[in-house]
């Protein structure tokens, strides 16, 4: 299983985490993800996820002229999105702990 | 900041794909603008289209499309005008020539052929959007669909002449009323779609019939005149498309 396939299931949560750090737009999310060590196979894969997050009411967006460059779509979390992010964080912590225990044979 | 040709093509194709998938105009515009901004940023930093779409534009378009809501209500709203235009195309020419009649076969077969033909066109448009085919291949496919459509319609007309009795044949005066209604629908269609195509196309198809219905010409002359205008119109259309293409892509043709 490639890491991009593994990432697919948790990209929703990762984007919620990135947007939780402050209003941001698509390309900037990619840069931030890269900063944390994520290597995206296709940068565009965040947009279907963003469409879904918006449809589910977890994020809202606004089009803004940027001082330099093109018109950009900025995303922020809704209260529902903040709740979803906290739940993702809990789920991820318990899952990663179990996986770590398993692969490191800690028991 | 201008985008590379490949990226411009990708965005145009994405719009076409989403449009033929029945997505909302406003939402299509939004995602297209968002991806354009992303591509501009990416190309500014020396990346190419593939780092964004991940190698398969068609799979990526499908992925985007699956997350957008399909606007069934919007599609249904288009239907009445569309059906009116189709009927007008079918009856106006015959009404002008004076050979309009309604038979059961025509009433059933023509709508079916029209639906199949439109379905084939939309399917091809979507395939074109997802693939990078040569202009020659696209052109061949469209001509193929057109030939099959015309062939099927001719077959139905022949069958109709030999085996079916019309259940209604309007009087000559009634045919002029029907023709006038057809022309009116073409004009409304042009205003509604904000293009000239619904006026120009019938003009080429039915214009010669209209003029010749006032002249005393034999059938062969009429047929030749019809064909001549049709071929001339086709060549003009091709030249126009070529010219448009050159204008939009001055370095690429």
Image (cartoon, coloured by chain):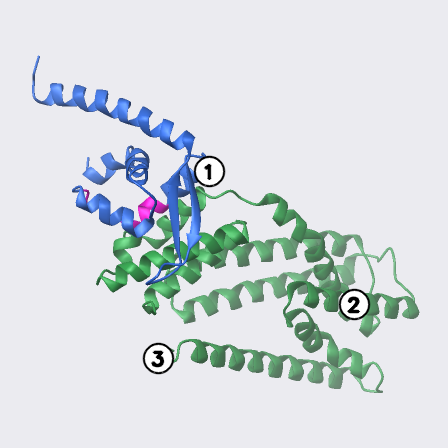
Chain identifier, colour green: B
Between B124 and A66, the residue placed more toward the observer is A66
Chain under callout 2? B
Q: Which quadrant: the N terminus of chain A?
A: top left
For the residues beneath circles 3 and 1, the answer to whether they share a chain is no
Q: Residue at x 63, y 69 (%)?
A: B195
Residue drawn at x 84%, y 58% as measured from the top left: B166
Which of these two is toward me, B166 or B145? B145
**Label 1 belongs to which residue?**
A55
- Dots 3 and 2: beta carbons under 8 Å? no
Q: In this view, does B167 lie above or below B244?
A: above
Q: Residue furthest top?
A: A107
Disc nearer the start of the sequence (3/2): 2
Helix, strand or loop status at disc 1: helix
Q: Give me the residue at 29% from left, 54% from top.
A: B52
Mark number displayed over residue B251: 3
Q: Residue B184 carries which label?
A: 2
Residue A7: within the magenta?
Answer: no
Residue A63 lies, in percent from the top left, at: 43, 52
**In the picture, which chain is blue?**
A
Foreground tag (2 vs 1)? 1
Q: What stretch is highlighted in magenta?
A: A38-47
Residue B214 horizontal/vertical position (percent): 85, 84
- Badge 3 density bin: few <14, some 14–19, many ≥20, Cα 10 Å: few
């Amino acid at each position: 299983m490639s890491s991009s396939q593994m990432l697919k299931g948790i990209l929703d949560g990762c984007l919620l985490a990135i947007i939780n750090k402050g209003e941001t737009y698509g390309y900037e999310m990619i840069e931030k993800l890269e900063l944390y060590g994520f290597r995206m196979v296709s940068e565009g894969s965040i947009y279907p996820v963003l469409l879904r997050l918006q449809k589910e009411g977890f994020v809202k967006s606004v089009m803004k002229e940027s001082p330099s460059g093109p018109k950009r779509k900025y995303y922020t979390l809704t209260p529902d999105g903040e709740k979803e992010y906290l739940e993702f964080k809990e789920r991820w912590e318990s899952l990663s702990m179990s996986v770590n225990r398993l692969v490191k044979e800690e028991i | 900041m201008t985008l590379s040709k490949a990226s411009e093509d990708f965005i145009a194709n994405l719009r076409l794909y989403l449009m033929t998938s029945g997505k909302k105009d406003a939402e299509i515009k939004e995602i297209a603008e968002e991806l354009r901004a992303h591509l501009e940023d990416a190309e500014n930093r020396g990346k190419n289209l593939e780092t964004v779409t991940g190698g398969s534009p068609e799979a990526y378009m499908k992925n985007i499309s699956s997350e957008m809501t399909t606007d069934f209500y919007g599609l249904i709203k288009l239907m009445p005008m569309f059906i009116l235009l189709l009927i007008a195309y079918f009856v106006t020419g015959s009404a002008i020539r004076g050979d309009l009649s309604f038979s059961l076969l025509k009433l059933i077969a023509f709508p079916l052929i029209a639906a199949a033909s439109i379905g084939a066109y939309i399917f091809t448009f979507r395939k074109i959007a997802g693939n990078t085919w040569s202009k020659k291949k696209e052109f061949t496919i469209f001509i193929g669909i057109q030939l099959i459509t015309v062939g099927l319609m001719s077959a139905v007309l022949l069958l109709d002449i030999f085996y079916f009795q019309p259940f209604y044949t309007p009087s000559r005066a009634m045919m002029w009323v029907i023709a006038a209604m057809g022309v009116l629908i073409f004009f409304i269609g042009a205003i509604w779609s904000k293009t000239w195509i619904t006026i120009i196309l019938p003009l080429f198809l039915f214009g010669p019939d209209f003029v010749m219905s006032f002249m005393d010409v034999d059938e062969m002359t009429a047929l030749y005149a019809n064909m001549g205008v049709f071929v001339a119109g086709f060549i003009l259309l091709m030249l126009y498309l070529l010219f448009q293409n050159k204008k939009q892509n001055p370095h690429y043709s």
